[in-house]
Image (tube, rainbow, N blue to C red):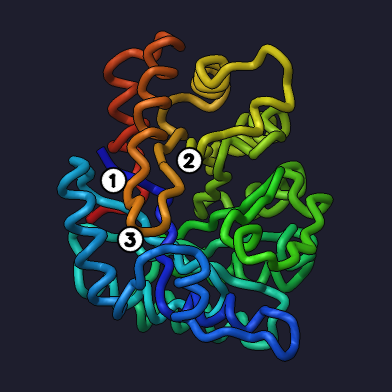
Amino acid sequence: MNDCHIHFFSEQFFEALGRQRPPGSQQAATDVIAALGWQAPGSPDDLADRWAQELDRAGVGRAALIASVPGDEESVGRAVARQPSRFVGFFMLDPTAPDAASRTGQALERLGLRCICLFPAMQRYSLHDPRVREIVSLAAKHAGTAVFVHCGALSVGVRKKLGLPSRFDVHFGNPLDLHALAADFPGVPFIVPHFGAGLLREALLIADLCPNVYLDTSSTNRWISYTPGLTLADVFRQTVEVAGADRVIFGTDSSFFPRGWNRSVYDTQLSALSAAGVNEGDRQRILSGNFDRLFPA
């Protein structure tokens, strides 16, 4: 089994959250961690080793680690360098930032990261923005680079816990806006997490139109409650029917310690795969094979 969706909550991540407190109440990383009641991550090397040990206990072979604030590429780069056989580096990017293109080049070329993560609703930009196209064109020039695009409902639990405002605009998170990019860059794999996070129909439409669009299964998928009667088994069954098992990738959305790897997500998804009647071969593709094919070791 592999996991395509683990957030790498580094010291720099907590520092960034502390800086986002209101003027006069900014906090150091240690204070943020204490307020959350979580365990300090230590250095990127320490956190990489801890995740490797955690995945060993869980029986997970390889995983994607996501730098979860823009500008934290170095932390995940160090983790990948520390455990290159275990980890694939993803990084969050704001393509509207003045240094977005240069940061992307550094992340892909110097740090060896392999997936650019876009959160349009978070930074409030359109996927039709020419600056987004520029970033995707950089991905196209680096073979083996994917682009992750968060669509649908967006809620960041750590921000809620800290009382930080989340001035997101889900208007920018429609999977349909991905169509032109996916069609114009057919060699770039695009990953839409959480089955589109409430926009399943739109995510499936794009996956049907564009064979380079993949859906990740991560998180509790509580967005299912937006559609009365819908079950996770239904979601898996319909996704495999439309996109094929070759374009569904297992993930958990694990993030912090002491919780570590979120086994309950795995157990729930395994039960749903069984209830959906997904055969063993397709199940193995979803749980491990597709990740290895997209991100060979």
Look at the picture and state if 179 lies above or below 131: above
Q: Amino acid at mark 1?
A: Asp
Mark 3 and mark 1: Cα distance apart in space = 10 Å
Mark 2 and mark 3: Cα distance apart in space = 16 Å
Q: Amino acid at mark 2?
A: Ser
**Neighbours of disc 3 within 10 Å: few (<14), some (14-19), many (20+):** many
Q: Quadrant of the C terminus?
A: bottom left
Of circles 3 and 1, the one toward us is 3
Residue 255 sits in quarter:
bottom left
In screen coordinates, is 88 left or right of 165? left
Q: Secondary structure at mark 1?
A: helix
Residue 181 sits in quarter:
bottom right
Can you identify the residue that label 1 sits on? Answer: 292
Nearer-the-camera pick, 125 or 233: 233
The dot on residue 88 is 3
Is residue 114 visible to the viewer in this orientation of the structure?
no
**CB under 8 Å between callouts 3 and 1?**
no
Is residue 270 visible to the viewer in this orientation of the structure?
yes
Q: Amino acid at mark 3?
A: Val
The answer to which of marks 2 and 3 sits earlier in the sequence is 3
The image shows residue 101 at horizontal and vertical percentages of: 60, 81
Can you identify the residue that label 2 sits on? Answer: 218
